[in-house]
Image (cartoon, coloured by chain):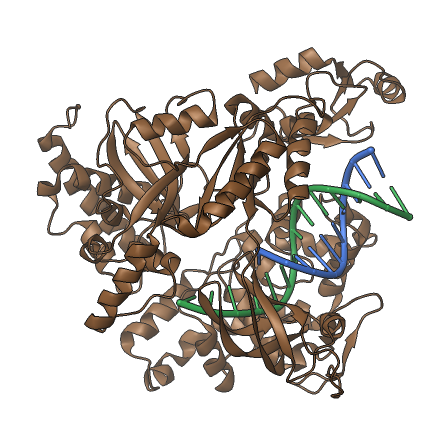
Chain colours: A brown, B green, C blue
DNA sequence: GAGCCTCGAGTTCC
DNA sequence: CTCGAGGCTC
């Protein structure tokens, strides 16, 4: 490439990277004392990979990429997306589409008859992929993963002929996002080839595409007929256009395929008409699609609309009705979760639905079984909700006189009484930690990915160690090294796997505070609430002090998102003697990190803003979203805690109160200026 | 008190 | 992904 980096520079840098990455590997794995964050480490690995991609002749024999690729358990390398890869909200009916259009207009403070254009295009059933081009060169291909972190499939996407290695006239940084898929015809042909070769037969084109893209060996991917279709973009060094439609045409001009059926619509009616047209064409399309995607066309409006949680307000996926199938309910089993909840699971005569064979289906709870009038032996109609989780839609044999299914009133695992609390649907085992299933599930939760994330301590190992009496409470995990010799004598545990496991455990002696709190498994405290609690209290000890103090519930309830129910659950947890002992025991083994906020602090972080009177250029929701983007919070009423009041025409009592309290008051124009500066 | 929205908990198949 | 429940707003 014709830029400043010479080959000599690159060779020098690669040498340094190899040594540096090796040093950090050692610090992390052997000495458990990383000097840099995971993100910084990832950046080194990525720089190494990008340099190697540009100077393939300089790849070193001791290259970190070779070692990383060769690591037996690691699979594909992880990459953090520069911009998160979000999903879209789903709709299943014309009403929901109309509501979406109305909601967009409401948010933008436009009248219902206002003119807002949308794009509409088929939603390909493949797997999302992000392609990063820097100065026209393809430097990274990544799968969606969980939206924030995906897998590096650069070497594999380079083998896809739809994807250019280089392009002219593109922005310096361009991340194209789209779907990697396999056409129906190519899928059939591939399966025929696989069959004659005695290889794996794929259930559907989607799985075939996923299996082909996530290969460690790119030569296998190269032999698979993968295709690509762009539907959007991630990071950009400059805007592509002023509208979605033109931006997609621009991407097409870089020789990246874009859907033929991408159109601009001027109303909900036109969107629905296009949906019906695509639905009609569906069977004749060369690839599988599962719906139609709508996006607000004007990009300035997209920006104003922003995001809710994990989906943009400006987009919608209008899904085709789920495929359904009929089968027989052979049995109902009861599973016991970590909270003691008894969940009935239906065992089915295996049946194909939407390209996979379904044999199990969750029945949720006692009420659901009653609502459907389910009995063992019934014929049922099932579907895969959102094309993923199977569910029973209908019972086809309601009239036969067989005895109804009786939901157990005792825990099938420990025999304790199982009851539903007043006003609750769920039936729970009252055995607590007496119940082996609950003990097991709580340990599983403690080490799970969202909590401590101890790799290699899976379901099977936990069960094995519990059986041996080595593992009863979370603290015991950190004492497993005392059983090292005995473990080495057991089947399936060789030196290497034992060291990997004990190493993974040792690496979590200083766990992230919120993950640790989440891992304790307190009712109603998930990862978000755990983070909010520690943001307020800093350390677990402080939280415990608050929960045990006089009027603790009130102090806890002051935390955002914590009300009486969550506060009571916390107070109960810390009052229960067994929990206190288990926590002290655990804290003697590990030191959770105090909370550090990852959000950058700004002038408005944590401030409270009240909007009053009418707003003319935006809706209240938009104003609220703007406040949140600044790191502030929009509240409904003025109090001593209010930091700013934005008053429009017609403001009354709130404005008066703000003036009495001496709170800063601005008008809408001044607010817009604050937002622009932030 | 109703009607959002967010969060927690449970789950399937590959 | 879905469901119910909890919290917050109007």
Q: Quadrant of residue A308?
A: top right
Q: Quadrant of residue A609?
A: top right
Which residue sits at x=18%, y=54%? A66
Which residue sits at x=74%, y=55%? A566
Quarter occupied by the N terminus of chain A:
top left
Q: Position of residue A237 (x, y in %)?
A: 37, 24
Q: Is residue A240 left or right of residue A377?
A: left
Is residue A199 depicted above or below A154 in this figure? below
Could one spot residue A31 in this view of the protein? no
Quarter occupied by the C terminus of chain A:
top right
Which residue sits at x=26%, y=61%? A189
Is residue A46 depicted above or below A194 in this figure? above
Q: How many marks?
A: 0
Could one spot residue A531 in this view of the protein? yes
Q: Is residue A509 left or right of residue A189?
A: right
Is residue A382 depicted above or below A47 in this figure? below
Q: Position of residue A565 (x, y in %)?
A: 78, 56
Q: Position of residue A504 (x, y in %)?
A: 39, 64
Closer-to-camera residue (A334/A246): A246
Closer-to-camera residue (A599/A673): A673
Q: Position of residue A144 (x, y in %)?
A: 41, 48
Q: Is residue A34 left or right of residue A405?
A: left
């Amino acid at each position: 490439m014709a830029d400043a980096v010479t080959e000599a520079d690159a060779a020098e840098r690669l040498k340094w990277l190899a040594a540096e990455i090796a040093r950090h590997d050692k610090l992390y794995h052997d000495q458990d004392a990383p000097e840099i964050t995971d993100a910084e480490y990832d950046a080194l690995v990525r720089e190494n990979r990008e340099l190697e991609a540009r100077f393939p002749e300089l790849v070193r024999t001791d290259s970190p990429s070779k070692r990383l690729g060769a690591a037996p358990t690691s699979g594909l390398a992880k990459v953090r997306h520069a911009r998160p890869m979000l999903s879209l909200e789903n709709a299943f009916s014309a009403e929901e589409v109309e509501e979406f259009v109305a909601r967009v207009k409401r948010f933008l403070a436009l009248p219902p008859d206002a003119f807002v254009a949308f794009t509409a295009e088929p939603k390909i059933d493949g797997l999302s992929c992000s392609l990063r081009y820097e100065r026209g060169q393809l430097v990274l291909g990544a799968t969606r993963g969980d939206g924030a972190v995906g897998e590096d499939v650069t070497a594999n996407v380079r083998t896809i002929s739809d994807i250019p290695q280089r392009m002219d006239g593109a922005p310096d940084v361009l991340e194209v996002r789209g779907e990697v898929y396999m056409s129906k015809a190519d899928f059939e042909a591939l399966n025929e080839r696989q069959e004659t070769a005695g290889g794996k037969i794929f259930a559907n084109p989607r799985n075939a595409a996923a299996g082909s893209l996530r290969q460690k060996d790119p030569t296998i991917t190269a032999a698979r007929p993968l295709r690509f279709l762009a539907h959007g973009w991630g990071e950009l060094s400059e805007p592509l256009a002023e509208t979605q439609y033109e931006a997609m045409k621009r991407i097409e001009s870089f020789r990246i395929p874009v859907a033929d059926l991408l159109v601009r619509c001027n109303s909900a009616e036109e969107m629905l008409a296009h949906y019906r047209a695509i639905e009609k064409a569906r069977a004749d399309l060369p690839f599988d699609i599962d719906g139609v995607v709508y996006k607000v066309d004007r990009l300035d409006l997209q920006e104003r609309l922003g995001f809710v949680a994990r989906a943009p307000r400006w987009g919608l996926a209008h899904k085709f009705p789920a495929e359904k199938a009929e089968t027989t309910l052979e049995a109902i089993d009861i599973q016991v979760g970590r909270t003691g909840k008894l969940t009935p699971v239906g065992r089915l005569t295996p049946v194909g639905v939407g390209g996979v064979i379904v044999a199990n289906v969750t029945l949720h709870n006692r009420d659901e079984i009653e609502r459907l009038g389910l009995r063992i032996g019934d014929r049922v109609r099932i579907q895969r909700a959102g094309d993923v989780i199977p569910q029973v839609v209908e019972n086809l044999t309601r009239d036969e006189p067989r005895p109804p299914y009786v939901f157990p009133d005792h825990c099938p695992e420990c025999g304790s009484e199982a009851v539903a609390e007043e006003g609750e649907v769920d039936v729970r085992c009252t055995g607590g930690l007496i119940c082996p299933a609950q003990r097991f599930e709580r340990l599983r939760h403690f080490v799970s990915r969202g909590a401590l994330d101890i790799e290699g301590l899976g379901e099977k190992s936990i069960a094995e160690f519990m059986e041996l009496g080595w593992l009863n409470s979370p603290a015991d995990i950190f004492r497993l090294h005392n059983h090292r010799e005995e473990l080495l004598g057991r089947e399936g545990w060789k030196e290497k796997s034992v060291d990997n496991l004990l190493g993974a455990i040792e690496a979590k002696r200083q766990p992230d505070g919120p993950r640790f709190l989440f891992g304790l498994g307190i009712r109603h405290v998930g990862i978000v609430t755990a983070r909010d609690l520690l943001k307020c209290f800093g350390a677990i000890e402080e939280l415990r002090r608050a929960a045990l103090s006089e009027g603790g519930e009130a102090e806890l309830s002051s935390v955002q998102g914590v009300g009486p129910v969550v506060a009571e659950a916390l107070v109960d947890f810390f009052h229960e003697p067994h929990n206190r002992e288990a926590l002290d025991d655990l804290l003697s083994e590990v030191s959770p990190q105090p909370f550090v906020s990852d959000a950058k602090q700004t002038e408005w972080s944590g401030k409270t803003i009240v909007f009053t009177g009418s707003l003319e250029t935006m809706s209240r929701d938009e104003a609220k979203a703007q406040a949140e983007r600044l790191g502030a919070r929009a509240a409904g009423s003025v109090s001593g805690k209010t930091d700013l009041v934005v008053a429009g025409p017609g403001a009354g009592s709130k404005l008066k109160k703000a003036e009495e309290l001496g709170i800063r008051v601005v008008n809408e124009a001044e607010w817009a200026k604050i937002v622009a500066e932030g």
